[in-house]
Amino acid sequence: MISRFSNGYARLPDDFFTRVDPTPLPAPYLIDVNPDAMALLDMDVAASADPDFIAVFAGNRVPEGAKPVAMCYAGHQFGHYVPRLGDGRAILLGEVTNQRGEAWEVQLKGAGQTRYSRDGDGRAVLRSTIREYLCGEAMHGLGIPTTRALCIVGSDEEVYREQIETAAVLARLAPTHIRFGTFEYFFHSGQYRGVWELANWLLERHFQHVSGYRNPYVEMLREMVASTARLVARWQLVGFAHGVMNTDNMSVLGLTLDYGPFGFLDTYEPGFVCNHSDHQGRYAFDKQPQVALWNLSCLAQSMLPLLHPEDGDAAGALANEVLGDFEKVFMDAYIHGLRDKLGLVSEDGRDPVLFAELLKLMAANRADHTRFFRALSDFSSHDERARCAAGAEFADPFAFDAWAEHYRQRLRAEHSQDDARARAMKRVNPKYILRNYLAEQAIEKARQRDFSEIERLRRLLARPFDEQPGMDAYASSPPAWARGIEVSCSS
Ligand code: AMP
Ligand code: MG
């Protein structure tokens, strides 16, 4: 078993966390284990057969060297500042450094109450752990920065949400789980010393490459702005809606963090809201870039004392200058990404118009986002009469043909080779995504104690760009029964 736990975070001052042991989970059983994440800890899946493994990841035995803590943070939730949140059900066991020298924090989500639980029971339901487990690995498969999912341990312990469900514990990994809200907690409570300690800890452990700059804090913020901008561009390109982009769910490393009522687009619907409690549509799919920038401005505000300790105006000017990078980094990543999705290699000043036209038509024609781009890989640049399956994703295929004529001209102008382009496009346009209804099927089976669908989806989604024999049904649009699935934010 893992015996090399250390505690980088727990070496921060006491007000950064509270020491707490996980609450034992009654009669735990292993639901699924992810060999790819096990490898990050230099562990083989075989290790999961050891009863000790289940005991550790159920939270029933604290492994040697680990010093479990709940992390303290605050955050803006739906635009309102909440002065103290903190891990109300996630417990950080510590970190494991693998043979490659990478340190991975190991966190148990749903491991019981902490000082920050408020009225919560400290548990996570099986349903939400399956969703986070599968989506973390699906995002990783897509090449999108994310926390990783190690395993799920379940129990028959009852948990009360809208209905009675059962408890599970998700083990997840990240280089650090620190959020924008960690900075906000110290800044808004007037503990500037904490802001400095947090920043120095991050510089030393995660931003060493900027520590030589004259003002490393400005450069660190610049990196946070850029990594967040690039992350959200990736979300937009793949059709991922996070659902709860509160600042306490935003990673300082630009990782996708805290999967709740997220959703992947089926039909391309720019205003898609996946969280049915988000009545205002604050976190609608097409609002994500502007929300990310708003969240970054909360972060920058909390870092003001670092940017220029003596001169508030100068600090503000620096913060604004750095936040000003967001739009360019986002647009570069987004336009570049769209070009790749369309298999274009050269740049053309008219591309943004070509892209905007396409997206407008996709929305009007309720085209399936994933199926459309995948099918477009097989477009013929020379044969006007060849039917492209992408057109079949449009309610009105003639609308596709009109756009396709412009696309064909654009491809010809850069002498695009159909075969090479198809191969390149299939490396960026996934065939398989974690559609809600697929997750729902895995959850339904798991409730009957059949965990095979979780494993099947995990394997499938680890290679979303590959053709996988016998798995075509997983790439189809959602069946009629799945259209009305609502995702609750209770988890
Ligand atoms: P989330 O929406 O999952 O990101 O959670 C927001 C805040 O509520 C965090 O501080 C969580 O730790 C806390 N929280 C959510 N669910 C529970 C629960 N069942 N028990 C205790 N705290 C919770
Ligand atoms: Mg959260």
Image (tube, rainbow, N blue to C red):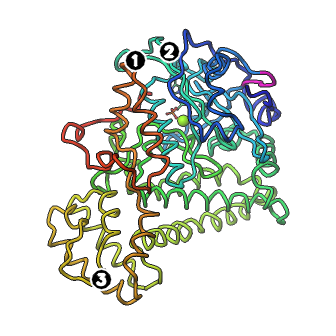
Q: Which residues are magenta?
A: 64-68
Which comes sooner in the sequence, label 2 or label 1? Answer: 2
Q: Residues within 10 Å of mark 1 (few under 14, many from 20)?
A: some
Hey, what amino acid is under mark 2?
Ser
Contact flag, marks 3 and 2 (Cβ < 8 Å)? no
| Quadrant hosting residue 379 | bottom left
| Left or right, residue 443 beside residue 1 | left
| Left or right, residue 336 beside residue 189 | left
Q: Return the residue at label 1.
A: 165
In the image, residue 405 above or below residue 56: below
Q: Residues within 10 Å of mark 2 (few under 14, many from 20)?
A: some
Q: Return the residue at label 2.
A: 155
Distance between the Cα atoms at labels 1 and 3? 53 Å
Report whether the residue tagged 2 is closer than 8 Å to ligand 1.
no
Q: Measuring from the top left, give residue 127's x and y in whole percent.
A: 42, 27
Which comes sooner in the sequence, label 1 or label 3? Answer: 1
| Left or right, residue 321 beside residue 416 | right
The kind of secondary structure the magenta stretch mainly shows is loop
Q: Measuring from the top left, give residue 470's x and y in whole percent.
A: 33, 46
Distance between the Cα atoms at labels 3 and 2? 56 Å
Q: Return the residue at label 3.
A: 408
Along the line of sight, which residue is nearer the eye, 262 or 386?
Answer: 386
